[in-house]
């Protein structure tokens, strides 16, 4: 299941780092951040709890860039 979220990230380098962190999370098959569109696309694994994964994604993103916000 793929979902698209709005994300606030300050620079392309941080967007790439956030993307890499989210890809490593349990329940995520793939993820991509489009810096220009400020969109995060997450492809969830079968049976993954979307809310749990996105809370973990927000926490991981904050470690990379503390101003990063994912709207889910």
Image (cartoon, grey):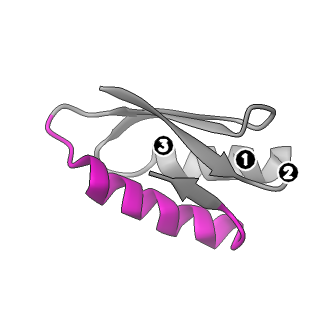
Image coordinates of residue 20 in percent, x first then y, are 59, 46
For the point 14% across and 38% down, the residue is 47
Looking at the rendered image, the disc whose residue lies closer to the viewer, 1 or 3, is: 1
How far is the residue under mark 1 from the one under mark 3?
Answer: 12 Å
How far is the residue under mark 1 from the one under mark 2?
Answer: 6 Å
Q: Nearer the viewer, residue 52 or 22?
A: 52
Q: Which residue is mark 2?
A: 11
For the point 77% across and 38% down, the residue is 35
Q: Earlier in the sequence, mark 3 or mark 2?
A: 2
Residue stretch rendered in magenta on the structure: 47-68
Q: Which residue is mark 1?
A: 15
Is 7 left, or right, of 50 in this rendering?
right
For the point 29% across and 55% down, the residue is 51
Q: Which element type, helix, strand or loop, lies under badge 3?
A: helix
Dividing the image into 4 quarters, which one contains the N terminus? top left
User: Farthest top residue?
Assistant: 1
User: Is 51 inside the magenta-drawn segment?
Assistant: yes
Few, some or many residues within 10 Å of mark 3 (<14, 14–19, 20+): some
Q: Earlier in the sequence, mark 1 or mark 3?
A: 1
Few, some or many residues within 10 Å of mark 1 (<14, 14–19, 20+): many
Few, some or many residues within 10 Å of mark 2 (<14, 14–19, 20+): few
| Figure check: 35 above or below 17 | above
Q: Which residue is mark 3?
A: 23
For the point 48% across and 43% down, the residue is 23
The reply to whether callout 1 and callout 2 are in contact (CB within 8 Å) is yes
């Amino acid at each position: 299941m793929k979902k698209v979220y709005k994300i606030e990230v300050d620079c392309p380098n941080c967007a790439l780092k956030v993307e890499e962190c989210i890809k490593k999370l349990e329940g995520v098959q793939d993820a991509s951040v489009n810096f220009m569109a400020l969109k995060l696309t997450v492809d969830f694994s079968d049976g993954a709890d979307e809310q749990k994964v996105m809370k973990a994604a927000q926490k991981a993103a904050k470690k990379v860039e503390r101003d990063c916000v994912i709207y889910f």
